[in-house]
Amino acid sequence: MTELELKYGCNPNQKPARIFMESGELPLKVLNGKPGYINFLDALNSWQLVKELKAATGLPAAASFKHVSPAGAAVAKELTDVERQMYFAGDLPLSPIASAYVRARGADRLCSYGDWAALSDVCDEETARFLALEVSDGVIAPGYTGKALEILKTKRKGGYNVVEIDPDYVPKPLEHKDVFGITFEQGRNDFAIQEGLLENLVTQNKDLPAEARRDMLLSLIALKYTQSNSVCYAKDGMTIGVGAGQQSRIHCTRLAGNKADSWWLRQHPKALSLPFVEGIRRPDRDNAIDVYLSDEYEDILADGVWQNTFTQRPEPLTREEKAAWIAQLSGVTVGSDAFFPFGDNVERARKSGVQYIVQPGGSIRDDHVIATCDKYGIAMAFTGMRLFHH
């Protein structure tokens, strides 16, 4: 048996703590730092996500994980000038795997604060240099270049967590967990999410372009490793809003939709031209943008708080301007880990530019959900496969 002793479990009072295997060697190595219990939960879940995402799309993939769910996930794609600005990438050189991580973190920069990064490919110097600028707990990848490891070892005063995973490791088909002293056993969810799942188009609109198929696969794979209930909005090969762990499906859809709206609003010219004070920290910029886009910002302006963040009082983004900007969002895909029980989920999703939906189907109200999609010309695929993750 091989094991790694941990400082504590989920909370400081939960001792002793360790990760171990009953037989064989652990398929990972800690190259720097001392990852904790939650770090390893994030690392192992996020690694599975990016490995499967690359297998499904053929593109380098990355994820930004927080509390055992993705804040963002993306495949490699060259960034536009606007994306470089809104993701704080500046003029940094970006390799394909670096671009994937910049986009994954950019999906929800506020929630990615203190994230665990996962990379499908070897971590290179470009990715390490971007990681060095961000508040992050650690990274997992199948390997690291010498320069990348050198950079990462200087982060967090030398304590940044760097984990290398064996990309060829295949876990046993049965998995176990203990709850209240009782052991649960189940078959590992090794269901492969592939394009064949998208053939059952149940709506009148059966036009599913390649970009939508890619985003459907992305949303489904992200949902497979998101705490349920969960809904995921995706566009251009990246998640733009993930709603995790809600008891109600419509609350998942609203939460994820609100995040998608915020991602889009960050591209508004007023948001891109905010006059930040010189030297402001990246997390403070993220927080300020989030507040600026909120409905409470005009009240905060009246209190004068802006003086600590901006060189001059920013012009508010009004509710009318927000609504007009969000109305321009289109080409968005929504995935759900279980069926939509009512058409209200479709009604909410289409307000955030959704034109494509993928979900298991199987509700007694499927006809109503399909009719709601048809009302707006939305194309919807039924996969027949639930993707709960607990």
Image (cartoon, rainbow, N blue to C red):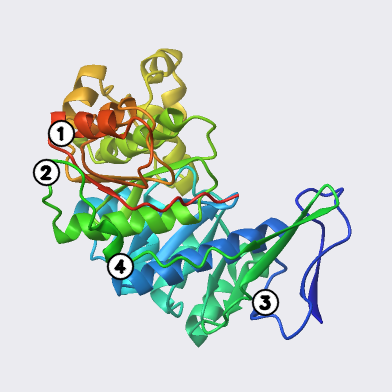
Q: Residue at x 39, y 29 (%)?
A: 254
Q: Indicate which disc residue 30 carries.
A: 3
Indicate the quadrant containing the N terminus: top left, top right, bottom left or bottom right.
bottom right
Q: Indicate which disc residue 205 carries.
A: 2
Q: Indicate which disc residue 374 carries.
A: 1
Q: Secondary structure at mark 2?
A: loop
Residue 73 figure quarter: bottom left
Q: Nearer the viewer, residue 37 or 137?
A: 37
Is residue 6 left or right of 230 when viewed as pictured? right
Q: Is residue 73 above or below residue 174?
A: above
Label 4 vs 1, first from the N-terminus: 4
Is residue 32 left or right of 228 when viewed as pictured? right
Q: Nearer the viewer, residue 299 or 378?
A: 378
Residue 130 figure quarter: bottom left
Number of other residues with Cα within 10 Å of mark 2, as a class: few under 14, some 14 to 19, many 20 or more: some
Label 3 vs 1, first from the N-terminus: 3
Q: Indicate which disc residue 76 carries.
A: 4
Q: Secondary structure at mark 1?
A: helix
Residue 125 figure quarter: bottom left
Q: Gap between marks 2 and 1, in whole Å?
A: 7 Å
Q: Gap between marks 4 and 2, in whole Å?
A: 29 Å
Is residue 336 left or right of 18 when viewed as pictured? left
The amino acid beneath tag 3 is: Val
Q: Residue at x 56, y 62 (%)?
A: 45
User: Which one is in front in this view, the residue at disc 4 or the one at disc 1?
Assistant: 1
* Tag 4 near tag 2, CB within 8 Å: no
Number of other residues with Cα within 10 Å of mark 4, as a class: few under 14, some 14 to 19, many 20 or more: many
